[in-house]
Image: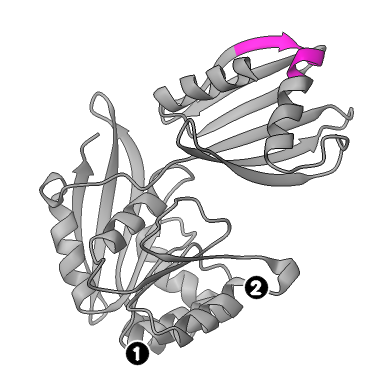
Amino acid sequence: MEPVNQLLQLAKAKHVSDVYFMPKGDQLEISFRQATGIEQIQLVPSDMGQRWVNYLKFQAGMNVAEHRRVQAGAYQDTKLGLFLRLSSVANYQGQESLVVRLITEVPPIAQQDLPLFAHLRQLLANRGLLTLSGPTGSGKTTLLYQLAQSLVPEQMVMTIEDPVEIYAPTFLQLQVNPRADMTYATLVKAALRHRPDCLIIGEIRDRETAQIACEAAISGHIVMATVHARHPLDVPLRLTSLGVESALVSAAVMATAAVSLVFRPTVHAQVDLWQWEKGVATHDQSIIPA
């Protein structure tokens, strides 16, 4: 469908992370999420908008006859060079909404562009757990992939995510699927049997995953993960609150960092790094040029 393809082309050109199709009365509002916020693109009649939504759902293998229940799907658009992840749900009036996440391959980064990058690589050589925290869309996963990509082909890299957000053919990428009993904890256990040199965990959210990640970090693996914490200095507390012994956390955590988006005057990712050594944290900061 040409109007939809043109819309996605525009989204890609503007480096959009998400495209929203939201019901607004008898119209459908289409908006783009960018680093600067959400921008309204156009309003279309509901019947036209529903045809666009159905087209995208069909491409993603979703049930086009179901408009109320939660659905999820994904597909690769080879012409645009995008992997699209879709999520749909109806509001209380039974009107369907759709969000399309645009996923591209991990962008390359030169080490000289980020002073902290070489430092992070040096830290990873010592093995241990590196955690990132920060808001959605700030670049946490991208930075982890860039760090891991710098290890290939010297190392074996495995990723565990829910869902996989970046396509990296040089990695062994696993995706959480609770219906198949493939939880974070289950996949981390399975991953360690594959003897990876570097393990990326999309999110540490429960005790078992935190425990295994810390144990892997002190047993010679490079472990990188995201952790929901108010501040990077709170990560050890967050891990202990999940049930991991403080001594294990202290031995496993090598560094914690916060990733956020700043504008100078264009969008950049700012990395605040805390390095842990014998329970003492030292701080450094760097900007990733756009």
Which amino acid is tagged 2? Answer: Met
Binning the other alpha carbons within 10 Å of mark 1 as few (below 14), some (14 to 19) or many (20 upward) gives few
Q: Which mark is residue 258?
A: none
Residue 220 versus residue 14 in the image, above or below = below
In terms of depth relative to the viewer, which is nearer, 26 or 4?
4
Q: Which mark is residue 182?
A: 2
In terms of depth relative to the viewer, which is nearer, 40 or 197?
197
Image coords of residue 154 (percent x, y): 22, 72
Kindly report the distance in space between the C-alpha atoms of the residues bearing marks 1 and 2. 23 Å
Residue appearing at x 45%, y 50% in the figure: 166
Image coords of residue 290 (percent x, y): 25, 34
What range is drawn magenta here?
42-49
Could you tell whether 110 is left or right of 202 in the image? left
In terms of depth relative to the viewer, which is nearer, 109 or 1?
1
Q: Is disc 2 placed on a helix, strand or loop?
A: loop
Tell me if I can see residue 207 in this picture.
no
Quadrant of res 269: top left
Image coords of residue 204 (percent x, y): 51, 68
- The quadrant of the picture occupied by the N terminus is top right
Mark 1 and mark 2 lie on one chain; the one further toward the N terminus is: 2
Instruction: Give the colour scheme shown.
Output: one colour
Quadrant of res 26: top right
Residue 27 versus residue 116 in the image, above or below = above
Q: Is disc 1 placed on a helix, strand or loop?
A: loop
Tell me if I can see residue 113 in this picture.
yes
Residue appearing at x 72%, y 71% in the figure: 180
